[in-house]
Amino acid sequence: MTESSLNAFKGTIAQERKLKDVIAKHKDMPGALLPVLQEAQDIYGYLPIEVQQMVADGLGISLSEVYGVATFYSQFSLTPKGEHRISVCLGTACYVKGADKILAAIEEKLGIKSGECTPDGLFSIDSCRCVGACGLAPVMMVDDEVYGKMTPDQVDKILDKYIKKGGK
Amino acid sequence: MKLEELNKIKKEHEQIVKVRKIVASEGEKLAKKTGYRKQVLVCGGTGCTSSGSKKVIEALEKSLKANGLEKEILVVRTGCFGLCSLGPIMIVYPEGAFYSQATPEGVERIVKEHLKEGKIVKELLYEETVHEDGSIISLSETAFYKKQLRVALRNCGVIDPENIDEYIAVDGYQALAKVLTKMTPDDVINEITASGLRGRGGGGFPTGRKWSFAKASVNDVKYVCCNADEGDPGAFMDRSILEGDPQCIIEAMIIAGYAIGAHHGFVYIRAEYPIAVQRLQKAIDQAKEYGFLGKNIFGSGFDFDMEIRLGAGAFVCGEETALMTSIEGNRGEPRPRPPFPAVKGLFGKPTVLNNVETYANIAQIILNGSKWFTSMGTPKSPGTKVFALGGKITNVGLVEIPMGTTLREIVEEIGGGIPNGKKFKAAQTGGPSGGCIPALHIDTPIDYDSLLALGSMMGSGGMIILDEDTCMVDIAKFYLEFTVDESCGKCTPCRVGTRRLLQFLDKITSGKGEMEDLEKIDELARHMQTSSLCALGQTAPNPVLSTMNYFKDEYIAHIKDKTCPAGVCKALMKYEIIPAKCKGCTLCARNCPVGAISGTVKQPHVINQDKCIKCGLCMKNCKFGAIYTH
């Protein structure tokens, strides 16, 4: 199987219907593109070119305009994310308390770099700028769970918890 | 909503909130009148939620039920108290007992011993609030709170942010009523101008003047915007205000709308702040239900409505023109000014844009008058400023101080000093746009102008404390990496300039720097300051210039001596073996992944510096402490 067919877009009818509802709801609102893309990403988990095309058609704007916005903001991802999304805060408060070492430990454990997804699709790593929990620096998040006052040697134990849970 | 109705709600709820504000002995009498013997306030801000306050609240409610106390004890989930490093925080009134780092297990004890039997659980209290003789001092007397003055944060940690009645109980919407029934738009602008309030987002532009420009622009449609896209990493003032007191922002935006003649408002807020977004939306819904938003507010004939727009993670959108371009649904790129937003802003219409903290001051200025406001702070920077205190400091958290408070008071008294007996090195303010204040200037009173004079800036209020273990070149590099990432790419000085600056710093921190690089950095930085399109590019060199100015010796050490004095820059670190301590056990040599250590058994070993990759494995494995770095 080639890489492109592995990552081929697989949308369901239900997802498409949801997206159409979102577009219809926002169509006449000024500045609709951002909220529509945000909701589209909630529906699909990421914004593949096929979804961007649907948004462009639905809002009556060009694909290049949609692509321009989708690639401008860090919130939007054009590639799929892992089932568990790890984000390591690299805000200043976390950085001065050694957040880079936490990130390195996670990268080493999973064998991928920040911004990438593990081959089995279980984890993806991102760095983020300040989750606002500076009192707990350094901080990492797995999905919605916040882990504060981290040290590099805690990484193993925390990630193993998710590995044991396994995929869906 | 009529004024009489507003006052009725206020009267109904006033006493409940008052219990949290007055001294214990009087509070007890008052508590009896409210129907609740005691009130337990638990912080539900992001910091405390991250450290588990949700579980604490669940345990509290469960335990109260199990003990049959749920009807006589009121549980309130509030916004931020400020002492984030001690979270989750829990306060019991009328005593004002301040429990820190609360746990579900601790809560069981507190319910049983304190709430049921009336004996405060002293071991679980924040230690600063317990005297040596065992008596309890009130929170406002502790070092952390004593020098603070809470204006913008006045309701954070006091009221339930999801209950509009509690906001009304603390004079909420009285300012709006006053404005709409007794003042003309010009009166409002004059009062704000006279207060000398300056933009709390960082620039420090006088708010009253901004409003008067927008009022003077003639147009059928105008807008009021709130900048809640707090992008400075390490700053969380605006988030805390929105989480703790969202109604005060709504009230201020309606007042601004009345002053300039706008009927619609937008709050542009980071999507990364889910709790703040949800509370603000709830607050907007409640304000609509009560008739503070909508048509004919207070029967004045004035209409105002507002909505939330979520940011999507772009630091540049904190710049006013970029923020508006983003609300319009485009790539958030800035545009040249003039025309200024007051003339041509959102959707091409005259627009007022203020930051969250600026709005948080408005209602108080209207109610108490501009004279009250100018009585605080310094003549050129009246009022207070909220700082998010972080980094190498004991009391990490949110503090609000009168302008003119010295850095020393913030670090040593409010912040509780530097942990682990380390020395204060510098305070970084203004984030990626600011600079640092070195120990030499620790007695500088903090206001807009004094910070600018030191080559830093107020910024939105992030204050990161750095100790002797911090490498200043590395910190400058950290901020440059940030601005390289966040530069929108529209103008060349910023897009290329930030990258070139980072290359210089990379070169220096990897031991390849030359002295002439410093001159090149300086020249490039000056060009960026004068020719970038927006503040992001204009201020991006500040972290480098400021650290070069105050810590030039560190730069020179990296370049000439190829050492990092703070021991941070890995490429410049050297691992060496102390022959006197080395027993020749060969453990290090066997573990070295690149075979850089040689020596014979029972003889001192040597590290070949050319081969060493500075992984640190040898030092980790040595049982005799014979390996050190420098």
Image (tube, coloured by chain):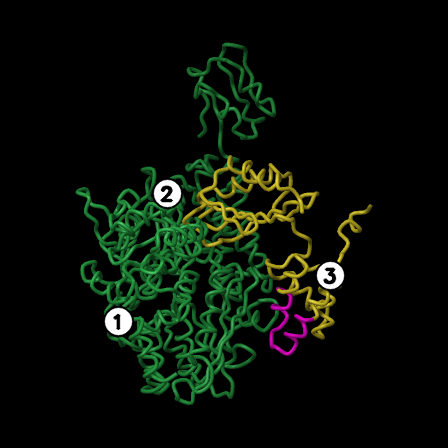
Chain colours: A yellow, B green
A32 falls in the magenta region? yes
Whether residue B188 is visible, yes or no, is: no
Q: Residue furthest top?
A: B602
Q: Is residue A127 left or right of residue B199?
A: right
Say what secondary structure mark 2 lies in. strand
Q: Tell me the residue at 82%/45% (across/down).
A: A1
* Crowd around label 2: few <14 · some 14–19 · many ≥20 (10 Å): many
Q: Tell me which amino acid carries mark 2.
A: Asp
Q: Residue at x 67, y 72 (%)?
A: A23
Label ID, residue B253: none
Q: Distance of mark 1 from mark 2, alpha carbons? A: 35 Å
Give yes or no for contact between labels 3 and 2 (Cβ–Cβ under 8 Å). no
What stretch of residues is rendered in magenta?
A21-38
Q: Callout 3, which amino acid?
A: Ile
Labelled disc at residue B467: 2
Which residue is at a point 26% across and 54% down the rendered structure image? B139
The residue beneath circle 3 is A49
- Residue at the spot of label 1: B374
Tell me: B362 left or right of A145: left
